[in-house]
Image (spheres, grey):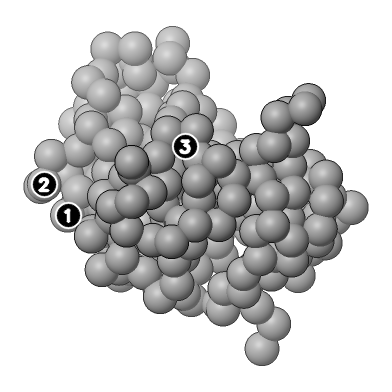
Amino acid sequence: MEAAIELDNLERRYGERVALAGVSLRLEQGQTLAVLGGNGAGKTTLLRVLAGLLRPQGGSARVLGAELPAERWKLPAQVGYLGHEPLLYRELSGRENLRYHADLHGVPRARVDELLAEVGMAERADDPVRELSKGLVQRLAAARAVLHEPALLLLDEPRANLDPAAAELLEPLIGRASGRTRVLVSHDVEGALAEADLSIGLRDGRPAAVGRELYR
């Protein structure tokens, strides 16, 4: 079976600054990769490369059988991205936002109502996003990320702004219970390692040992 993600000496720079260097790993389908490290370590940059949003500038990257950057056009239909920005239109309601994304991916609109119920947003679905709390916006963002049933989830602090009850509510969608291949960025070392099959620590864009020393 082909690996979900294969990286070999991946590199990415912002001008002269090295954001990623020497990153190599293989993640099998259905597994979870935990990406750990302090602020500015390169975690979000790695997610954006895997999503096809940033071009690798050295080494090789293959995601769900697509060679990057040449075949990055294949990824939007297969990847769900949940980042720091919810990627929702603030003036539209949650229902309108999800319907917009459903139409983009050719997903039946009935799926929107199912997801709104699953994330506990049925009663607030017609409120403008700008009027919602951060926790409710995060629920909607999670629903958007899985709306098109992606094979791979790229999750950047996915439980941010969620209370324990809301985090449990989203577990079937974005947690291990989803059965999807996942790349999980987190500052919670113990929590991330507990749900990961594989882990990588980054410091200044380079692989480093996993543990509390990443944050010193």
Q: Nearer the viewer, residue 67 or 201?
A: 201
Q: Amino acid at mark 1?
A: Glu
Q: Nearer the viewer, residue 141 or 128?
A: 141
Outermost residue, right side:
70
Q: Is residue 81 visible?
A: no
Q: Which mark's residue is nearer the viewer, 3 or 1? A: 3
Tell me residue 8's x, y (percent): 74, 66
Q: Which image quadrant: the C terminus?
A: top left
The residue carrying mark 3 is 83
Q: Secondary structure at mark 2?
A: helix
Tell me residue 29's x, y (percent): 55, 77
Instruction: Give the crowd class for mark 3: few <14, some 14-19, many >=20 residues within 10 Å.
Output: many
Outermost residue, bottom side:
1
Asked where in the image residue 5 lies, by quadrant, the reply is bottom right
The residue carrying mark 2 is 164
Would residue 105 be found to the left or right of residue 57 on screen? left
The residue carrying mark 1 is 168
Tell me residue 141's x, y (percent): 40, 36
- Residue at 69% over, 37% down: 18
Q: CA distance from mark 1 to mark 2?
A: 6 Å
Instruction: Give the crowd class for mark 2: few <14, some 14-19, many >=20 residues within 10 Å.
Output: few
- Residue at 49% over, 57% down: 208
Q: CA distance from mark 3 to mark 1?
A: 19 Å
Q: Amino acid at mark 2?
A: Pro
